[in-house]
């Protein structure tokens, strides 16, 4: 599991939503008419840097708006929240307060993070507003259908609204929490990382550096177990290097790779990879029609360059020795061939076969 340097060298462009993809999103209640746009939130008058508890710059800034802008923005953000979480029921709006709007100055998508609070009980949550990007939409839909957890979002031609995914950022977990874990917990985290690595590779989700996923502690009877979940879907099926879709090759993840090496034997790693492939292939049964329609749309869509597609299909062919990949003409073709390969080889794998 060697770590490569500089896997991603160029900034990924934003791709518009095609009419076919828009129809798919409308069909599955993902589409929202314009209430507030990404550009609307850029009309701030001032900003303040946000520092963490160790006085380190988080690369987020808190935005300040003039009074007239603030009233309108707050109202529309509350409407967005009710649509995202309660089908637009307006009865809760008087009990909601927009505590803050933050802007990320780092990365490709430069999202806005909105903190919204119920003033009756002080419970709060976040949601994110980003520029619309077709490849990110495909990434979120694949996450919704192929990962262990569903994901809620809304989109239109200008803006994408994503719900908050709770957890400890991977880089924070590696530096502050992992050293304090018990040896048993470290073994369990190593297992989860192998499965996460496999899941990203299969569904061609790239750039899973440690700050693009979260580690989620879950209390289970008398122990704490950990799950790993992606939070950034910007690099879905875009890059031409296969290693970009395998988190193990990012230097930021080296402590996790070292953990896998130290805690798991080769046979166990192979077993966990097969388990994850089999689990994903079974999820495909549940979402079969929806996935087929999405892949059909993706095959006709442009979400990458010809150079990236040509290079990636060669590298996947080298990895799988499956000639069908060489015939691919789009990222949608590659996803279709990947899922067909998965179903053909792993859908009927039973737990007995793994013992």
Image (tube, rainbow, N blue to C red):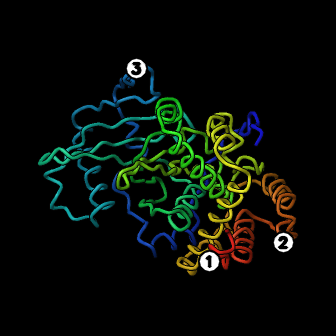
Which residue is the site of mark 1?
A: 292
Q: Nearer the viewer, residue 216 or 231?
A: 216
Q: Left or right: where does residue 232 sit relative to residue 99?
A: right
| Neighbourhood count class around disc 1 (C-alpha, 10 Å): few under 14, some 14–19, many 20 upward | few
Residue at (56%, 55%) from the top-left corner? 136
Q: First in sequence: mark 3 or mark 2?
A: 3
Residue at (68%, 65%) from the top-left corner? 274
Q: First in sequence: mark 1 or mark 3?
A: 3
Helix, strand or loop for disc 2 = helix
Which residue is the site of mark 3?
A: 54
Residue at (49%, 58%) from the top-left corner? 157
Which residue is the site of mark 2?
A: 324
Q: Quick check: can you spot residue 37?
A: no
Q: Which quadrant of the rendered structure holds the N terminus?
A: top right
Relative vertical location of residue 176 with respect to residue 349 in this rendering, above or below: above
Helix, strand or loop for disc 1 = helix
């Amino acid at each position: 599991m060697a770590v490569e340097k500089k896997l991603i060298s160029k900034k990924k462009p934003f791709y518009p939503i095609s009419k076919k993809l828009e129809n798919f999103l409308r069909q599955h209640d993902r589409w929202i008419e314009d209430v507030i746009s990404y550009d609307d939130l850029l009309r701030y008058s001032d900003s303040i840097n946000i520092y963490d508890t160790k006085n380190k710059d988080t690369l987020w800034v808190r935005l300040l708006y003039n009074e007239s802008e603030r009233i309108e923005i707050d109202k529309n953000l509350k409407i967005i929240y009710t649509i995202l979480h309660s089908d637009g029921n307006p009865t809760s709006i008087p009990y909601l307060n927009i505590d803050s709007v933050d802007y990320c100055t780092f990365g490709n998508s430069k999202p806005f993070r909105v903190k919204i609070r119920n003033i009756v009980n002080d419970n709060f949550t976040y949601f994110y507003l980003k520029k619309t990007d077709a490849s990110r939409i495909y990434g979120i839909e694949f996450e919704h259908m192929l990962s262990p957890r569903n994901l809620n979002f809304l989109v239109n031609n200008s803006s994408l609204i994503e719900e908050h995914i709770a957890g400890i950022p991977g880089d924070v977990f590696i530096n502050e929490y992992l050293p304090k874990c018990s040896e048993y917990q470290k073994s369990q985290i190593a297992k989860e990382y192998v499965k996460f690595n496999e899941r990203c590779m299969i569904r061609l989700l790239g750039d899973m550096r440690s700050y693009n996923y979260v580690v989620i502690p879950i209390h289970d009877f008398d122990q704490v177990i950990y799950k790993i979940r992606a939070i950034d879907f910007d690099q879905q099926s875009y890059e031409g290097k296969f290693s970009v879709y395998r988190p193990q090759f990012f230097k930021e993840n080296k402590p996790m790779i070292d953990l896998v090496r130290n805690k798991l034997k080769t046979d166990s790693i192979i077993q966990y990879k097969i388990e994850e492939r089999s689990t994903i292939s079974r999820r495909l049964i549940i979402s079969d029609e929806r996935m087929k329609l999405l892949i059909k749309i993706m095959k006709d869509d442009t979400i990458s360059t010809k150079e990236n597609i040509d290079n990636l299909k060669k590298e996947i062919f080298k990895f799988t020795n499956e000639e069908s990949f060489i015939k691919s003409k789009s990222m949608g073709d590659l996803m279709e061939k990947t899922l067909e390969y998965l179903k053909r080889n792993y859908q009927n794998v039973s737990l007995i076969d793994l013992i």
